[in-house]
Image (spheres, coloured by chain):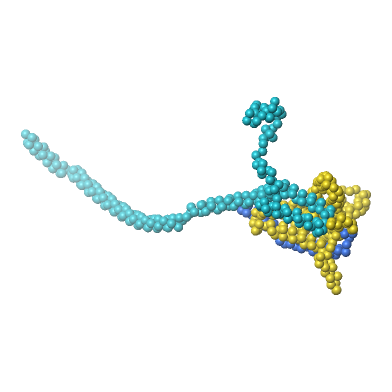
Amino acid sequence: MPQLVPFYFLNQLTYGFLLITVLLVLFSQFFLPRILRLYVSRLFISKL
Amino acid sequence: MSLRALTMKASTRPLVMLGMRQAPIGARYMSTPAPQDPKEKASSILSALPGNSALSKTGILATSAAAAVYAISNELYVINDETILLATFSGFVAIAVKFLAPAYKDYADARVKQVSDVLNASRTKHVDAVKQRIDSVSELQSVSDTTKVLFDVSKETVELEAKAFELKQKVDLASEAKSVLDSWVRYEASVRQLQQQQLAETVIKKVTSELSNSKFQDKVLQQSVADVEKLFASLK
Amino acid sequence: MLNLLNTYINSPLDQFEIRVFLGFVSPFFDLSCLSFTTFSLYALIVFIVIVGGLNLLTTNNDKIVGSRWYVSQEAMYDTILNMVKGQIGGKYWGYYFPLVYTFFIFIFTANLISMIPYSFALSAHLVFVVSLSTIIWLGATITGLYKHGLIFFSLFVPTGTPLALVPLLVLIELLSYFARAISLGLRLSANIIAGHLLLLILGGLVLSLMSVSYIYFIFGFIPLAAILAILCLEFAIAVIQSYVWSILTSSYLKDALYLH
């Protein structure tokens, strides 16, 4: 499959792992804690 | 028979055959849907086009057709394998919008409603609990006035008690004095009684000693005879 | 006049071709790995869709109730949470949950974006996906070796095997353990490549059927319905493959952390 064996290996790897790392940091620092905070606040309010 | 009934005008059609059914089909299946305005049904395709008025609809249709023809004939857009995929993908999107979107909307609405219901219920419960607490605390509203009144009452009580104590002391003193005087009186009375008794005893002793004396006995006898003679002389 | 003469044969593999939009050229270092290609363009699109479209714009002004869009995010969060808690469990599942969630969301979004016509399939590139799976496998192995030392190799002896079979079984287990590195990535890539190739080839066939005459055009709508069915299947595969990747990653992590 010529299109899947190009000279763009390093480009693919660079941008791919960059994307995965940035997503990982963003999710674990901001978005997943926000969802968790939402659930905890709902629980707190409903179990006052 | 039924065909003849149908060939007649509706006003003269015998109504008997219309009531009978050959097969036991469910009544709801035979029921007609809500009468759709035939004009609306006929123009459903036209109303599905984008645009608001007839002019804009024709304008949009004409523009898109012209753009498609221009693009294809000038090879801006080449019809290749992916065109088929474009057609199938738009078909898939149409199906999704028609069937999946309302289902997802209902599910999401139900979930949002459930969450907001739980939160609202807990909020009203909390409000009620706070109101109850406010009520129970407001029963002690007049606490300061009550304490003031109680304080005045206790002050009065203390004063009255002091007065009562004073009076009681006076009464005690008086009664003690009375009892002391009474005892003295009793003592005096007993002393006098004793003296009288002694006096009487001495007198009686003297009298009895005198009586035992013979001279006195003769004297008494003579006096008593003179008394009896006097009495006889008065009676006669 | 329409150019009906195709002097080049268009292969259905052309959809995976990578072109450079903005190249990085430097006389000192080889910075071509940073050039802006179709791969990086679609990585950027995936990033914008995930971060902007799904997480920042759907929060309904930070209300606790959330919006209808945010319900989907919450549903994905719940699914992956329960899956990771069920698979890994124990003391350490919380440490690996963001990683598994990131993989799931990335592959889910990348696959769904590749379904749009004239788009590009990010997960169809074997090199990227297989290297990702190899790194996951290597990371799991190193974690296991670091936590358990040499006892880690007890992973290859399943419980309850008679002593005579142990050498043979260890060899087989070792082989299957090494195969995990490439099988995880190859599964995803092969599914996506096969699906896209199939759709494109069928599309080409139906196009050549429909372009013969008007009657064939009318009758060509039946295979078109078949392609619609296969497209629905491809959507399902796109979603399921991301879930399969996540669940296998958590399974491999569980093997490394707790040694069955």
Residue A30, can we see it? Answer: yes
Relative placement, left or right, of C83 versus B11 is right
Q: Is residue B152 left or right of residue B113?
A: left
- Where does the N terminus of chain B fall, quadrant-wise? top right
Q: Is residue B226 left or right of residue B130?
A: left
Chain appearing in blue on the rendered image: A
Q: Residue at x 80, y 56 (%)?
A: B72
* Residue A30 picture location, percent across and down: 71, 61
> Residue B187's x, y, as percent?
28, 52
Which image quadrant: the C terminus of chain B?
top left
Q: Colour of chain B?
A: cyan
Q: Which residue is farthest top?
A: B1
Residue A37: image location, x then y, percent: 67, 57
The yellow one among the chains is C
Q: Nearer the viewer, residue C223 or C111?
A: C223
User: Who's the residue at 71% across and 54% down the image?
Assistant: B60
Total numbered circles: 0
Residue B179 location (% of width, % of height):
31, 52
The one of B47 and C105 positioned closer to us in this rendering: B47
Q: Tell me which residue sits at (66%, 52%) in the image.
A: B53
Does residue C235 appear anywhere in the picture? no
Front-lying residue, A36 or C24: C24
User: Residue at the spot x=79%, y=51% of the render?
Assistant: B87
